Amino acid sequence: AKCSATNTDPFQQPLLSKAADCELRCPDPDPFPAAYEKTITGVWRCSSDGTGQASVECLLDGRTCTASYRILGCELLRPCVTPPWDPCLVEGCRNLRPGYNCTASCRPPYVGTPGHGGCIANNTDPFRGLSWWTAPPSCTCPPPSEIPVGYTKVGEKWRCAEKYAGTPLVECLTGKECSGRTSFTGCSLVVPCAP
């Protein structure tokens, strides 16, 4: 502010000089926050591994007189969680990225029906599982080449054969080498009681 050298008015207030053109400039964060990027023209947006709408504001901290960005609106895309199936039995659909589809099928020598699903587009939930369009895969050991004595199969159910008793338990065991072996337990030969 200054008073004109030719001022004749004792009540004249000093003339304010034109305010300088000031622009608040924020330094770029180092490192950039996940899910954001800045274009060469200075526009902030969600990066290719993010989703949402970037909202960026340059703010001045009155206590420290420092400028910094407040960056909001983008979230990091996350793969869908791989189902907790036995990796010996099933292959496919692991760490599926958002927006992708997959088929999970039985690993040889295992047999069964495959499952078809996908990870929803723009998934940001690290705990979201796959969405299935069919039932998830159902895999088991191939049919045994020989059925052990004492067991018989009626339709899809295992039973103890004639002259054997118990509750059959037929399991597909994967083992350390993922070889696949059908285990039969629970049926015992019926014998007479001791005299």
Image (cartoon, rainbow, N blue to C red):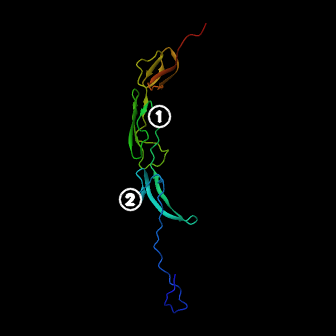
Q: CA distance from mark 2 to mark 1?
A: 46 Å
Compared to residue 58, the image places residue 186 above or below, namely above
Please give left or right for residue 4 compared with residue 116 in the image. Answer: right
Image location of residue 63, percent across then percent down: 58, 65
Q: Nearer the viewer, residue 95 or 61?
A: 61
Image location of residue 124, percent across then percent down: 46, 49
Residue 108: quadrant of the picture: top left
User: Disc 2 designates what residue?
Assistant: 40
- Report the mark closest to the observer, 2 or 1: 2
Q: Which of disc 1 and disc 2 is earlier in sequence?
A: 2
Residue with the most extreme front position? 5
Q: Which mark is residue 85?
A: 1
Residue with the most extreme top position? 195
Crowding at mark 1 (Cα within 10 Å: few <14, some 14-19, many 20+): few
| Quadrant in which the C terminus appears | top right
Q: Nearer the viewer, residue 166 or 9?
A: 9
Q: Measuring 46% from the left and 60% from the top, which residue is drawn there? A: 55
Q: Measuring 53% from the left and 65% from the top, which residue is drawn there? A: 60
Task: Provide the secondary structure element on which disc 1 rests.
Answer: loop
Residue with the most extreme bottom position? 8
Compared to residue 39, the image places residue 184 above or below, namely above
| Amino acid type at image mark 2 | Ile
Q: Measuring 40% from the left and 41% from the top, which residue is drawn there? A: 117
Task: Provide the secondary structure element on which disc 2 rests.
Answer: loop
Image location of residue 180, percent across then percent down: 44, 24
Residue 178: quadrant of the picture: top left
Q: Measuring 43% from the left and 52% from the top, which residue is drawn there? A: 50
| Amino acid type at image mark 1 | Trp
Residue with the most extreme right position? 195
